[in-house]
Image: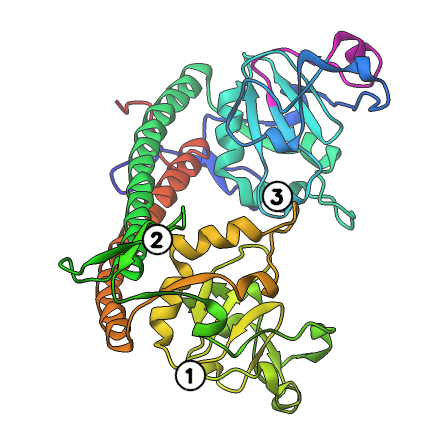
Amino acid sequence: MSSYKPYPAYKDSGVEWLGKVPEHWVLHKLKYLARFSGGGTPSRDVAEYWGGSIPWVSPKDMKAETIHSAEELITESGLSGSTTSLVSPGQILLVVRSGILKHTIPAAINEVEVALNQDMKAIQFDSKSCESKFFLRWIQGLNHDLLQAWLKQGATVESIEQDLLAGTIVPTPPPAERHKIVSYLDREIARIDTLASKKTRFINILREKRGTLITNAVTRGIDPTAKMKVLEASWLREIPLHWQLTPLKYVAPNLTVGIVVNPSDYVTDEGLPFIYGGDITEGGIHFETSRRISNENSVKNSKTRLQAGDLVTVRVGAPGITAVVPPECEGGNCASVMHIRRGDFDSDWLCYAMNSRVVRYQVEVVQYGAAQEQFNISHAVDFLIPVPPYEEQIAIKIHLNREKLRIDTLIKKTEISLTLLKERRSALITAAVTGQIDLREAS
């Protein structure tokens, strides 16, 4: 923000988290600037209330800062037969009851006429006192502080207290200045978002390249002159002539599932890493933040006690993701995951093979469950793995470690620059709508 200058004079807003604001900005309670309206749900038992043409906005629709439609539509009968009502275009739509309020306040402006469900509120401004777009940016810029100021204490589900919302002090610049701030922010945010979108696409391209690199190496090897043999499998056309397509149970005979009977009974505050599926990423384990198990209980469950070089595979949630057990997890244990004991294979090579598209495809074929996708070990033992000689496994591992590191480093650098870009976006909005920077002469 060093390139922007502050206003010449400030005054105390009287609000601790807001601090000082430009001297000529006017302070009003929100209830004197706007009107509020709520929503409701037409009866699900009346078919004629649903499937119409009126967007019925609920928290699940609040994914962007403008609303053009909704996942569910209601009819005129649904509108008149419930407590919901039409909201004219250009109003602030605010989520006032949802678990998402633990982290953020979703707000948007409706571009079309909509109805709301009971977990939403609409805020309509008198354009002379404030505009929806300025208030939207104000919410975005002060999201964290407003969460603390608005949330109802002791509620079962996070919700915004209407009296706290209505009593919020909002500093408003003169109309021409508001328009200037909004226009400047629109331009800068569009520029930042375009750049962020390019960086996100670049990250996705790199991840796709990494996936292709791994799959090619574990299915074709790294010798471009190797002779190939044709396979009958539709998902894998050919592998090197001297490789074997082998069921996982023959590659890794010692394969089982982590602790299944009441694993939570073994969780302690201290001890050895106790690895669940959520701790596993592609090629890595977040053992620092994992649950813990005592050495005594881990020994008691010796069948699944972890050794460095073992593999663990997610079974539920993101099935198929595999990592090698590092030395830091030695002696620990695992639950609700597939556990592959180290054996007559290179562990890193098998990890790459398990994370390749070839094995992921086989996981997708057998996985089940709508809410939580998962697979059974009885299916996993028959996953077909393209197996090269041991020396070639080592060569593939070395090749992939080197190339993956190069790609991962580039991804990390791009992710850091993307984070900084998002932080700049947030800081710019906050500074502009609270008067920390003077944009009256900005171009």
Residue drawn 74% across the image and 44% down it: 152
What is the count of numbered marks? 3
Q: What is the spatial separation of the Cα atoms under label 1 and label 2, in whole angstroms?
A: 38 Å
> Which residue reaches farthest left?
225
Where on the picture, by quarter, is residue 258?
Answer: bottom right
Of residue 354 and residue 142, the one placed in the foreground of this image is 354
On residue 327, which mark appears? 1
At x 53% / y 49%, what residue is drawn? 365
Q: Secondary structure at mark 1?
A: helix
Residue 246 at x, y percent in the picture? 41, 66
Instruction: Identify the residue position indicated by label 3 in the image.
Output: 147
Q: Amino acid at mark 2?
A: Leu
The residue drawn where x is 40% and y is 32% is: 432
- Quadrant of the image for the C terminus? top left
> Which mark is on residue 237?
none
Asked if residue 416 is positioned above or below residue 171 in the image, the reply reads below
- Note whether 255 is above or below 125 in the view shown: below
Left or right for 155, reference 373: right
Q: Residues within 10 Å of mark 1 (few under 14, many from 20)?
A: few
Which is more N-terminal, label 1 or label 3? 3
SS class, disc 3 = helix
The one of 57 and 380 positioned closer to us in this rendering: 380
Q: Which residues are magenta?
A: 75-92
